[in-house]
Amino acid sequence: MYQKRREYQQAIIVCQKATIAIPQAIQPYVIASQILKEGKDYRGAEQMIRKAQEIEPDNLAIRRQLGAIIALNMVMSSQEVNTAL
């Protein structure tokens, strides 16, 4: 609900509570990654999906998402550098 309303801080709080309640579940990390990506926090999104990968290292879907976020993070970082110059 918070994610749909673009209330990202509230949505992240819910995800954090879920990771505490069910530490071996990857879904809260995946959702947190999506929320952070929507909020243009690509580094935070990468960190969350990496935590999901630590829990399920053989999950191919998580690996794909991680690759996509890493690429997006690199593109956005290079754009920030080019804009600053």
Image (cartoon, grey):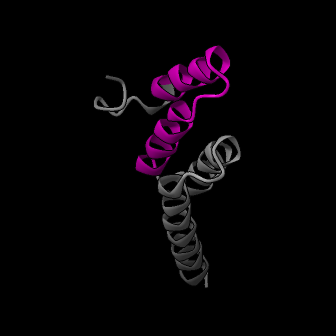
x, y percent for residue 11: 46, 26
At x 51%, y 58%, the residue is 60
Q: From the viewer's perspective, is 6 left or right of 56?
A: left
Residue 7: in magenta span: no
Quick check: is 13 in the magenta stretch? yes
Q: Is residue 2 above or below residue 60?
A: above
Residue 14 lies, in percent from the top left, at 51, 20
The residue at the far front in this view is 58
Q: Residue at x 62, y 24 (%)?
A: 19
Looking at the rendering, the stretch of residues picked out in magenta corresponds to: 10-39
Q: Please tell me whether residue 57 is drawn above or below residue 72 in the rendered image.
A: above
- Is residue 47 rendered to the left or right of residue 34? right
- Residue 2 x %, y %: 36, 24
Outermost residue toward the right in this view: 54
Please provide percent x and percent y for residue 33.
Answer: 52, 44
Looking at the image, is 26 positioned above or below residue 19? below
Q: Quadrant of the N terminus?
A: top left
